[in-house]
Image (tube, rainbow, N blue to C red):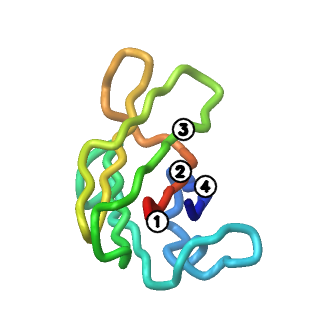
């Protein structure tokens, strides 16, 4: 499998091109984009990709100093959706990492 590890910060929208262009620290295809929580709602991140099918698996891990959870709420040929929640189960913006595994 091919692995694409990326870290997303909850304030990334202040720097919209940071992760799309920073291929020295993170592998994030310049053809991929992120639809921010400000558009979708608190704790919802849509990662738009050009994989072209749904033969992939995503692992997501919250990066926080307090208890947070994250899950993959949806995935298809063109995007997957990450949702993050605080300890009370309320949708909340949170930094997270994700890894995409391409299934041959």
Which quadrant holds the C terminus? bottom left
Is residue 41 or residue 73 the one in the foreground? 73
Between marks 3 and 1 in the image, the one whose residue lies nearer the viewer:
3
- Which numbered disc, 3 or 4, marks the residue that appears first in the sequence? 4
Q: CA distance from mark 2 to mark 1?
A: 17 Å
Q: Note whether 87 is above or below 19 in the view shown.
A: above
Q: CA distance from mark 3 to mark 4?
A: 9 Å
Q: Residue at x 25, y 68 (%)?
A: 77
Element on which disc 4 rests: strand
Q: CA distance from mark 1 to mark 4?
A: 13 Å
Q: CA distance from mark 2 to mark 4?
A: 7 Å
- Which numbered disc, 2 or 4, marks the residue that appears first in the sequence? 4
Q: Residue at x 51, y 84 (%)?
A: 30
Q: Quadrant of residue 85?
A: top left
Q: Note whether 28 is above or below 8 in the view shown.
A: below
Percent x, y for residue 3?
Answer: 59, 60
Q: Is residue 68 left or right of residue 82?
A: right
Q: Is there a contact, CB below 8 Å, between mark 2 and mark 3?
A: yes
Residue that mark 1 sits on: 13
Between marks 2 and 4 in the image, the one whose residue lies nearer the viewer:
2
Q: CA distance from mark 3 to mark 1?
A: 19 Å
Between marks 2 and 1 in the image, the one whose residue lies nearer the viewer:
2
Residue that mark 4 sits on: 7
Residue that mark 2 sits on: 98
Element on which disc 3 rests: strand
- Which numbered disc, 2 or 1, marks the residue that appears first in the sequence? 1
Which quadrant holds the N terminus? bottom right
Q: CA distance from mark 2 to mark 3?
A: 6 Å
- Which numbered disc, 3 or 1, marks the residue that appears first in the sequence? 1
Element on which disc 2 rests: strand
Is residue 58 or residue 81 the one in the foreground? 58
Q: Is there a contact, CB below 8 Å, between mark 2 and mark 1?
A: no
């Amino acid at each position: 499998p091919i692995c694409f590890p990326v870290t997303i910060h909850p304030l990334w929208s202040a720097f919209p091109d940071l992760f799309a262009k920073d291929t020295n620290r993170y592998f994030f295809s310049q053809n991929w984009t992120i639809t921010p929580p400000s558009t979708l709602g608190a704790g919802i991140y849509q990662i738009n990709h050009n994989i072209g099918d749904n033969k992939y698996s995503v692992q997501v891990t919250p990066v926080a100093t307090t208890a947070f959870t994250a899950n993959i709420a949806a995935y298809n040929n063109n995007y997957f959706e990450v949702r993050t929640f605080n300890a009370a189960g309320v949708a909340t913006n949170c930094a997270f990492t994700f890894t995409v595994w391409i299934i041959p």
